[in-house]
Image (cartoon, rainbow, N blue to C red):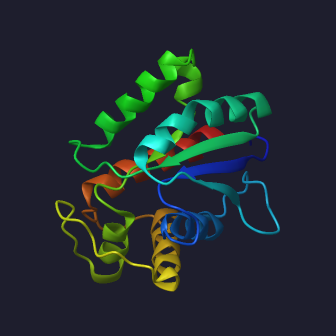
Amino acid sequence: MAKRTQIICMHEGQSGKSIDPVFANAFLKAYDPEWLRPFVTGKARFIGCGGKSELQKKFPQELKNCLNAGSDTTLIVLADVDELKNGEQLKEQYWEIARQNKISEESFENVVFIFPRKRIENWVQYLSTGVTDEGTVGPRDYNFSEAKDMAQKLAKKCRQPQQTKETLPKSLEWSCNNWKALVERMR
């Protein structure tokens, strides 16, 4: 087993005004991998970055900070895909930023990217109702309690073997695969 790690999660939006960190923190707490370093106030440190451009501007320094901290720190980037085709295109933008800042591909590949298509609210809608249209912007939701409950539901789904193949929204499936890659790396 790998040694315990802490999570740094950069996200769009500001703390207290976005459900993104609430959803991510509730997911991490509910999933509770044994290698995640326990914290009294939470499983991760969240950095609200306002919009996508501010997040991308801060990304290289935060990644370098994580790399300098050693293998016991993992960076998660939580951002909306928006007008791009998919998460891979957005990940390419981050790779270009990393290359411009002389960050190696090996270091870059240790970042976990969580990219909802339009908003994480689409995922909350899907988890609560079973349907969502990722082509439209999900309803702006400041219901932190529902976001927390749906994140816990997602963590439970991730921890239990699937009896049937559930069709997840594409961005949720893509993001879950990035999370699973981290889980496998840490074993």
Q: Let me know if residue 163 appears in the view.
A: no
* Location of residue 79 with respect to 143 vertically, above or below: above
Q: Nearer the viewer, residue 164 or 126?
A: 126
Estimate the x, y position of residue 131 in percent, counting from the top left.
22, 75
Task: Check the image and report above or below for 143 versus 77.
Answer: below
Report the residue that reaches farthest toward the right. Answer: 40
Q: Position of residue 103 (x, y in %)?
A: 57, 19
Residue in the picture at 78% in, 54% down: 37
* Of residues 71 and 31, the one drawn nearer to the viewer in this rendering: 71
Q: In the rendered image, which quarter contains the N terminus?
A: top right
Q: What quarter of the picture does the C terminus occupy?
A: top right
| Number of numbered labels in the structure image | 0
Residue 76 to residue 18: above or below? above
Instruction: Check the image and report above or below for 165 versus 55.
Output: below
Say whether residue 10 is left or right of residue 7. left
Residue 44 location, quadrant: bottom right
Q: Quadrant of residue 26?
A: bottom right
* Residue 32 visible to the viewer: yes
- The picture places residue 38, in percent across and down from the top left corner, at 79, 61
Percent coordinates x, y for residue 171 in the rendering: 31, 53
Residue in view at x 22 percent, y 71 percent: 132
Query: Observer-nearest residue: 51 or 2?
Result: 51
